[in-house]
Image (spheres, rainbow, N blue to C red):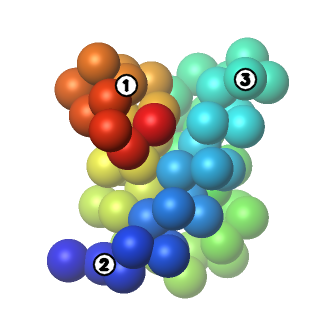
Amino acid sequence: MFSEFEHSCLLDMALECRRNGLSPSESSASLRRRTREFSAPLMIRQVVHTAFHPEHCPDLV
């Protein structure tokens, strides 16, 4: 499991990508570049999924 702070930061970035019109795959690539691949791919996939499907986790978005 990853820290709440890291999750929060990644989720904010993923939501920003969505607001800017990026697709989920473009958002994942953007997060990997922006974090310089510091964050694990699984974490990035999870936050992008949450950002693009907020109905699955409404308390996080």
x, y (%) of residue 58? 32, 29
Q: Amino acid at mark 3?
A: Arg
- Of pointers 2 and 1, the one earlier in the residue sequence: 2
Local SS, label 2:
loop
Front in this rendered view, residue 38 or 56: 56
Residue at 35% across / 22% down in the picture? 53
Q: Is residue 22 toward the left or the right of residue 25 in the image?
A: right
Q: For mark 1, what is the residue?
A: 54
Q: For mark 3, what is the residue?
A: 19
**Residues at badges 1 and 3 in contact (C-beta under 8 Å)?**
no
x, y (%) of residue 8? 51, 62
Mark 1 packing: few (<14 Cα in 10 Å), some, or many (20+)?
few
**How far is mark 3 from mark 2, CA to CA?**
25 Å
Mark 2 packing: few (<14 Cα in 10 Å), some, or many (20+)?
few
Q: Is residue 7 toward the left or the right of residue 9 in the image?
A: left
On the question of residue 29 being in view, the answer is: no
Q: Amino acid at mark 1?
A: Pro
x, y (%) of residue 28? 53, 45
- Asked if 34 appears above or below 4 in the picture, the reply is above
Q: For mark 2, what is the residue?
A: 2
